[in-house]
Image (cartoon, rainbow, N blue to C red):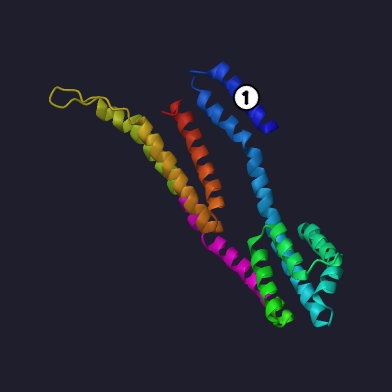
Amino acid sequence: MVEIFISLLAVAIDVYFFWGKRPFWPVAIIVLSLGWLHFWIDFFAENKRQKEIELKFVEFARTLVESVKSGVSIPRSIMNIAQKDFGALSPYLKKLAHQIEWGIPTRKALLTFSADTNNRVIKRSVSILVEAEQSGGDISNVLESVVESVINIKKMREERKSSVYSQIVQGYIVYFIFIVIMLILQLWLFPKLGNLSVGGSTPGEFNLNPTFFGLIMIQGFFAGIMIGKFSEGTIKQGVLHALILMTVAALIITTVKGSIL
């Protein structure tokens, strides 16, 4: 909230000093971007934390497999393993161990654990484990399969990310080339054509600036969504890329033209 208040105060100062002047829009865009920078930082921090949770979950599952194979029951194994350090996953494991110690059924405690982590991979893995326990399957084999599936998922993500990296860069480059073309049309080509007279008559003036600005914003939004979806597999990442593209585009346009429209 403090960042938002400071951002709004800076916008008010920008309006007071630069309203109607060329620097107004670029300064306003920069200030507003800094205002929601805190949310972007939180977003990246949460992504990093979720990746660490997934990594530590693999370590936890491997340790659990070894413990179960040695003849220790799952509840006792979880309580023993939870004493170790698993980084960002430790608070959730300690809560899981405490719930089991208090007599809460292991199945219910595991489901609560997966819900608390709010991680899709862990939720899917725990769901498989719970179903295997209910059906009376070999838990150690199921745990090994869960570990392998989580590792394969992480490998597939990394491979997809590395394979589409060049496409992401190309997407950004193509978008900025599109902006340059739009600016050339607005600032050079169309003014030249507007000064031409055909048959002694001057063509009417059409203000295409709002149309061009809208096209650039729409292109940036959908390009960002596609980039995020292909690189990370989530719409949330796509929205982040879209915000970056649209913000940079608006900053370039207002810096070059001195206004949005």
Horizontal side of residue 11 vs 86, given as left or right: left
188 over 136 or under it: above or below = above
> Which range is magenta?
145-172
Name which quarter of the figure residue 150 lies in.
bottom right
Residue 237 versus residue 113: which sits nearer the camera?
113
- Up-down: is 238 above or below 212? below
Residue 110 seen in the figure:
yes
As for residue 15 lying within the magenta part, the answer is no
Q: Main secondary structure of the magenta part?
A: helix
Residue, far left:
199
Which residue is found at the position 77% from the left and 70% from the top? Answer: 106
Give the crowd class for mark 1: few <14, some 14-19, many >=20 residues within 10 Å: some
Residue 121: image x %, image y %?
Answer: 64, 64
On screen, residue 215 above or below 125: above
Say if the magenta span includes residue 149: yes
Per the image, label 1 sits on a secondary structure element best described as helix
Residue type at the position of mark 1: Ala
Read off the residue under disc 1: 10
- Labels in figure, total: 1
Looking at the image, which residue is at 50% across and 53% down? 227
- In the figure, is residue 248 to the left or right of 130? left
Residue sitting at the far top: 16
Residue 129 image point, x, y percent: 69, 73
Q: Residue at x 59, y 21 (%)?
A: 12
Name the foreground residue: 153 vs 27: 153
In terms of depth relative to the viewer, which is nearer, 1 or 222? 1
User: What quarter of the picture does the N terminus occupy?
Assistant: top right
Q: Position of residue 32 (x, y in %)?
A: 58, 32
- Quadrant the C terminus occupies: top left
Task: Using the rendered image of the protein, determine whether residue 85 is visible from the camera's viewpoint.
Answer: no
